[in-house]
Image (cartoon, rainbow, N blue to C red):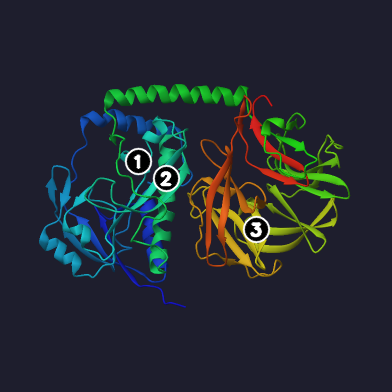
Amino acid sequence: MRKPMELKIGILCDNFNFKLWQQEIIEQIFLISGLELSLIILNDQKASKPSINKLGYRALTYIDRKFFKVQHDAFQIKDMKKALKDVSVIRVQPKPLNFGVKFSSEDVAKVESYGLDILIRFGFGIIKGDILNAARFGVWSLHHGDNMVNRGGPPGFWEVVKSESITGITLQKISADLDGGKVLRKSFVKTDATSFYRNQNAAFWAGVELMCSSLKDLRDEQLSLSKDENFGESMFYSYPLYKDPGNLRSFGIFCSFWVRRLKEAFNEKYAPPQWSLAYKYSLKNRVESSIFRYKNLLPPKGYEWADPFVVFEDQHYYVFIEELEKKRKNAHLSYLKFDNKGQLLTPNAMKVIEEDFHLSYPFIFKEGGQYYMIPEMAQSHEVWIYKATKFPNKWEKFHLLFEDKQLFDPSLYYHDNTWYLFGTEKTNIGSSSDQFLCLYYSEDLFSGKWMPHPLNPVTRDVRGARPAGKIFNWKDKLIRPGQIGAPNYGYGVQFHEIIRLSKTEFEERPVDVLVPEWTDNIKAVHTVNFEKGFSVIDKQGTKI
């Protein structure tokens, strides 16, 4: 096995007061084998005073922060001077330009003398000149926006103003062109339309994962710097260069934002959405692709049904579901029984597994003539296989797959004599449960030796990362359904064709979507499964 590359890293910053997201990157550099923080480059220029024309924007964001709290504040400040006391420091006073700053040739030479592999930009604003080439792999910077549609700033702000469904995060090897440097990788989070601050917080935490995983992959020679990684290069950038809004524009944004939020709060209280099911039986023994043909299946008043999985056993169909009684905190797992013609036999769901934590996504499968289930139980920080001691009613915990791990919507697939387990994970304390798809493998289903895939996370896009049902074959293609997590949770299903799947490779491409457009008042659909002519989905709406 090839020895990992050793990387010497420098950080460009304005002072030793680092934000929490920056602290996390620095701490990961110390923890990751093969990475060395060798140099801190401090900006000795005095910070310019904020413009009076931006008072409105500052007031808008201040009010937003006060009303909409976050659990893990990415912008919390900490003085790290003591923690970085053993790292070399040089102070520079770059020359101000009309747009950006430029390092003197003497300062560039000082930086070059450290033999750095990467410079990470945490400060200095727009950097131009020879400093961009002072490290072997250039200056890396996180742009908290999709550089194809959103250049400038403030980060994560205009996506909320414009009601965009996603907010991009772009890791670049920067050039003198603002946000136009070489794209190394991208990540996409759902735009949190409830708050500017919450959306910015989510984007910056996603950036932590993007930077740290890219550093590790460069170390392991799994990150190509010679070409863009599936993002292409645009010939033109046809959107505006975004800037902080002036006082008058800020007032308009403030008013329209709060009108929208009050309307949303009213709808949530007086017309709350509900999860239910829809299904279709077909004699043709295939998935029913025309969703408008499905028959609605409503839960009793005060309940929600979601995450349906179907099996055919003893000439009956059994649909296992997450069942939530709204007056209770946690959901349990139940099933509905149908005859072999798709007629419902049990209008009330039969409870089968209940724990003192939330259960959902009852991934059921048969192996060696025995039924097993891997439910989502992320709240417990464990992943268990349950065994049916008497199908379909009696189940017991059978085998612990992972402890001290939150795996969301775990989905199993057997391929080339190997078991693969898919599921999304939170990569840090502030990240989403819907964005980062991770993959584990083992040759023995009941082994304690499940290995993480070397490409984890194999997907960083909220538009299809989280599993949305069983992997299946369709027209000689291997299809993985994934949740489209924007513009709202579980909005739709993105179907991916798996091109390559092995212990060292994973590649997929989008081939089709299922979105809530077949009738009015449906706002989400996030699980699809079928078995022997019986197709079932879940859906969320207000009048369903």
Residue 75 x/y as whole percent = 37, 46
537 or 213, which is in the foreground?
537
Please give the residue where the numbered disc 1 appears in the rendered image: 155
In this rendered view, identify the residue nearer to me: 263 or 242: 242
Determine the image quadrant of residue 86: bottom left
Label 2 close to label 1 by CB (< 8 Å): yes
Q: Which of marks 2 and 1 is nearer the N terminus?
A: 1
For label 3, the residue is 382
Label 3 amino acid?
A: Glu
Rendering coords of residue 512 (x, y %) = 57, 42
Q: Quadrant of residue 316?
A: top right
Spatial distance from mark 3 to mark 1, Cα to Cα? 35 Å
Q: In this view, does 329 lie above or below 120?
A: above
Single out the mark in the foreground, 2 or 3.
2
Considering only order in the chain, which callout, 3 or 2, is on the residue closer to the N terminus?
Answer: 2
Q: In this view, does 83 lie above or below 424?
A: below
Task: Please tell me whether mark 1 sits on a helix, a strand or a loop.
Answer: loop
Which amino acid lies under the numbered mark 1 shown in the image of this protein? Pro
For label 2, the SS is helix
What's the CA distance linking mark 2 and mark 1?
8 Å
Tell me if 65 is positioned left or right of 120 in this view. Answer: right
Identity, as a three-letter code, of the amino acid under mark 2: Ala
Marks 2 and 3 sit apart, C-alpha to C-alpha, by: 27 Å
Q: Toward which corner of the image does residue 447 lie, by quadrant?
A: bottom right
Q: Report the residue marked by disc 2.
A: 203
